[in-house]
Image (tube, grey):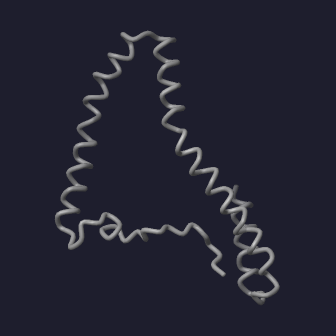
Amino acid sequence: MFSLLVMALIVGLSMAILPKESVKPLLDILESIQKIILHILLFSMKIASFAVFGLIVGMVDTVGVGTMVRLGVHGNSCSESWNCVAGIHIILKVCSKKTNIFYVFKIPQSANFGFFNS
């Protein structure tokens, strides 16, 4: 994995040094690959909730409803941490000048995941 990172660093630095006209075709290919991967990721995020539901149904079928109910009791104690997270979110929202959460964390609303902008 480290060798992959080093190779990406070497290629990136080489592309930064070369004139933009000579690396333009490679940039276009990388941008197209990035858009395809982003659409695959967005599609998988849309169907993830259905996959989790299917896993839960399979688990209930395997271990029974009684075991899942006991796990639900444990889940109630874990929800206290989510209440803390929600409280922090509300405090940040109230203390900020704007109520937009993107402003609080300074995240651009139109997130551009591209590294190479032409």
Tell me if 37 is positioned left or right of 28 in this view: left
Q: Residue furthest bottom?
A: 19
From the image, which quarter does the C terminus lie in?
Answer: bottom right
Above or below: residue 109 compared with residue 24? above
Image coordinates for residue 30, horizontal then vertical, percent: 73, 68
Foreground of the two, 14 or 68:
68
Image coordinates for residue 102, horizontal then vertical, percent: 35, 66
Q: Quadrant of residue 101?
A: bottom left
**Residue pictured at 75% horizontal, 67% vertical:** 7
**Residue pictured at 66% horizontal, 62% vertical:** 35
The count of marks equals 0
Above or below: residue 99 compared with residue 27? above
**Residue pictured at 55% horizontal, 39% vertical:** 47
Image coordinates for residue 37, horizontal then vertical, percent: 66, 56
Above or below: residue 49 compared with residue 91? above
From the image, which quarter does the N terminus lie in?
Answer: bottom right
Image coordinates for residue 50, horizontal then vertical, percent: 51, 32
Q: Quadrant of residue 9?
A: bottom right
**Residue pictured at 59% horizontal, 47% vertical:** 43
Q: Quadrant of residue 92?
A: bottom left
Tell me if 39 is positioned left or right of 78 in this view: right
